[in-house]
């Protein structure tokens, strides 16, 4: 993963176009392949193409055959949920979009696919199913919520949010240094931040893009430290396929290692993680 020469992006709306602009500032001599059938060959495409020139990057638009040779894929497509409505409401429609897109695409074996779209854990599960478990799928998940928590409580630089990127997220007690750990109050504030953002914005884009780029950097071995993100464990733990855990991106994670990690949590946090797993499973199996 150290030499990223071809990167794919599905979905070039608010989040996807911002992601591409950020990647362009970080990488040189890269070919970017964009798939977005809602984007015309017009202003946005030309603007992005012009921006890539100074880094010697190239942009290819809706050239599906180019996806066959990419080294990494970002998935940022889908229909956003209306303001004030839970992200699960659009689940059926977003599942259909994933199925229609990935059934027509071919990739190299075992490429990483970083998922930014909501519902993120369920989207990871659906992509894994449609691609017949041939790829390494990661979701930004509660890495974004972890960034939000650390912004909310700056002194807690090692704080982690696990579970589900949604109602069943929770702050990992072991990651907090404060003696007066205000679990209920902090969780409530944390869950309200997305709503606060959407009072003036269509949705989160800067935070989720930062999360996706961090996953990419860890994959590329530029950095490696535990991140709370969405990742498959194994097929023997179906109910925990896509729960967010604090794990290394480049480390193999099997059932034994996860059991060791799980046993290090308090009984309260174990219960929260299992509740998140049940919520994710329910949504994934629609």
Image: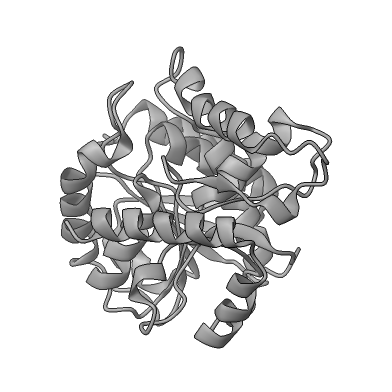
Q: Note whether 228 is above or below 25 in the view shown.
A: below
Q: Is residue 139 visible?
A: no
Choose top left, top right, bottom left or bottom right for residue 80.
top left
Q: Kindly identify the residue that appears in the image at 57 percent across and 43 percent down.
A: 144
Asked whether, in this view, residue 183 is left or right of residue 205, the answer is right
Q: Kindly identify the residue that appears in the image at 33 percent across and 21 percent down.
A: 83
- Residue 215 point in image, percent of width and height: 60, 58
Choose top left, top right, bottom left or bottom right for residue 149.
top right
Q: Nearer the viewer, residue 25 or 215?
A: 215
Asked whether, in this view, residue 50 is left or right of residue 55, the answer is left
Residue situated furthest top in the rendering: 200
Residue situated furthest front in the rendering: 267
Quadrant of the image containing the C terminus: bottom left
Q: In the rendered picture of this protein, how many numbered marks are placed on residues?
A: 0
Q: Note whether 79 is above or below 284 in the view shown.
A: above
Q: Nearer the viewer, residue 210 or 10?
A: 210
- Residue 208 point in image, percent of width and height: 53, 41
Q: Is residue 200 visible?
A: yes
Q: Nearer the viewer, residue 231 or 201?
A: 231
Asked whether, in this view, residue 147 is left or right of residue 88, the answer is right
- Residue 99 point in image, percent of width and height: 18, 60
Q: Kindly identify the residue that appears in the image at 72 percent across and 70 percent down.
A: 221
Q: Kindly identify the residue that appears in the image at 16 percent across and 44 percent down.
A: 93
Quadrant of the image containing the N terminus: bottom right
Asked whether, in this view, residue 135 is left or right of residue 265, the answer is left
Describe the colour scheme in one phrase.
one colour
- Residue 205 point in image, percent of width and height: 50, 33
């Amino acid at each position: 993963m150290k030499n990223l020469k071809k990167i794919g992006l599905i979905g070039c709306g608010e989040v996807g176009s911002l992601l591409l602009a950020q990647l362009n500032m970080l990488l040189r001599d890269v070919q970017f392949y964009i798939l977005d059938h809602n984007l015309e060959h017009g202003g946005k495409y030309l603007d992005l193409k012009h921006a890539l020139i100074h880094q010697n990057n190239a942009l290819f638009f809706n050239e599906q055959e180019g996806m066959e040779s990419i080294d990494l894929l970002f998935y940022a497509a889908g229909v956003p949920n209306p303001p004030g409505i839970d992200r699960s409401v659009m689940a059926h429609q977003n599942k259909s979009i994933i199925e229609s897109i990935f059934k027509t695409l071919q990739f190299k074996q075992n490429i990483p696919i970083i998922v930014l779209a909501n519902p993120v854990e369920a989207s990871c599960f659906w992509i894994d199913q449609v691609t017949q478990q041939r790829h390494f799928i990661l979701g930004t998940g509660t890495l974004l919520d972890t960034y939000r928590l650390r912004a909310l409580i700056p002194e807690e630089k090692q704080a982690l949010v696990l579970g589900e990127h949604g109602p069943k997220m929770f702050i990992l007690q072991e990651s907090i240094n404060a003696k007066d750990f205000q679990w209920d109050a902090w969780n409530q504030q944390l869950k309200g931040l997305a709503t606060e953002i959407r009072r003036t914005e269509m949705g989160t884009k800067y935070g989720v893009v930062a999360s996706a780029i961090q996953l990419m950097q860890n994959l590329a071995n530029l950095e490696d430290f535990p991140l709370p993100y969405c990742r498959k464990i194994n097929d023997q733990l179906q109910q925990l396929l896509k729960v967010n855990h604090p794990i290394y991106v480049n480390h193999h994670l099997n059932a034994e290692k996860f059991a060791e990690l799980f046993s290090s949590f308090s009984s309260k946090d174990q219960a929260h993680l299992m509740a998140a797993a049940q919520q994710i499973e329910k949504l994934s199996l629609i």
